[in-house]
Amino acid sequence: MTDIPRDEEAERNELAARSAGVLAQSEALFNSMGDGAIATDEFGRIVRVNPVALRLLGYEESEFIGEWFPKVVVALDETKSPISLLDRPITKAFLTGKTISDQLLYRTREGEHRPVAATVSPILLDGRPIGAIEVFRDITLEREVDRMKSEFISLASHQLRTPLSAIKTYSHMLIDGFMGELSASQQKALDTILSASDRMNELINLLLNVSRIEGGNITLNIKRHDLNKLMSELEKELALQAREKNIQLVFIQPKTLVHVRTDNLIAKEVLTNLITNAIKYTPDGGKVTIRLRARADSAVFSVADSGIGIPKYSQDHIFSKFFRAQNVMRTETTGSGLGLYLVKGLVDNLDGKIWFKSEENVGSTFYLELPKKPTIVS
């Protein structure tokens, strides 16, 4: 009987030693991370910060520990305006209990604005947040590379326009007989040249639009527009394209007029892209339905097709730059992977929302929501 207390004490000592070992291992892992890491308690007070975070932000550890995270780490948006507390990733993580990722600017001690990619994961106990860990990395170099790529694309696109214009002009002159009568084979060859030139021109325009979006050079003309009229215009302009593939194109709109304040040309470009995609990836004899619905504060378009759909594993990447799903590449060998990336950028500029539902080999439905009173200023 006298040995039992000693056994219990030995067990407690062994447990304490194990706990200390795990704690030391966790501490070493936290401090050796290649990204910045900051841990907080349930009130957002900083309890741990690693050397990379201190180096990126220019602070000493003593200036962080015990401080309220949103106070000591100042977050800004792309316009260098302070991000509200509710919009900060750490607040969203606490409120939702989910991991939140975002890109933002952090102000360093020296007053520099450092672009970072941050991910905040809440620490949950019985479903309740008792703290959070934010991991962030410096993306200055990535942004610079993206800027250089965009500048190159813009420059190359502008330079391509001049020779392409000459090719199209002289091809039209030949077709119109300005340089003599053409044989059937010559006519066919020139038609092929013009068709390829048109595709090249579309790609150049796409690249230039992407460059404009990434450079923040989109000029908006926000006015009150009749969306029923826009639907009618789209129906007329895309009817031929649908007929060529024997696609049934159905437009459904409310009898009452639907108005929103938006840039009509950009909204039309977005919808044209979505409908053209639906026609392209729907087999001959299929159906594409475009519907307009009015909500209290917005209008919602939906573009539903009976096409090839988007594989589940590709759906998280569908709005990414240069991304094309595997089943798309099997059925349509040509394509830039920029169309939906451009659409997402244009929708963001309109203060709108875009999302989709899709099932492979069944079809896809894309939704475009435009606010009746956007917060953007033209």
Image (tube, helix red, strand yellow):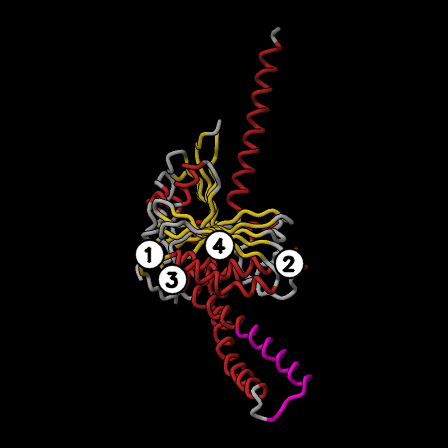
Q: Distance from label 4 to label 2 (Cα)?
A: 18 Å
Single out the mark in the foreground, 4 or 3.
4
Residue 152 horizontal/vertical position (percent): 50, 73
State yes or no: residue 197 in magenta.
yes
The correct choice, above or below, for 169 with respect to 253 in the image is below
Q: Amino acid at mark 4?
A: Phe
Single out the mark in the foreground, 2 or 3.
2
Q: Amino acid at mark 2?
A: Asp
Q: Amino acid at mark 3?
A: Asn
Mark 4 highlights which residue?
A: 251
Q: Which segment did they paint magenta?
A: 180-201
The correct choice, above or below, for 2 with respect to 229 in the image is above
Q: Distance from label 4 to label 3 (Cα)?
A: 18 Å
| SS type, badge 1 | strand
Residue 15 figure quarter = top right
Work out whether residue 236 or residue 214 is closer to the camera in this orientation and state it: 236
Q: Residue at x 55, y 65 (%)?
A: 240
Mark 2 highlights which residue?
A: 284
Single out the mark in the foreground, 4 or 1.
4
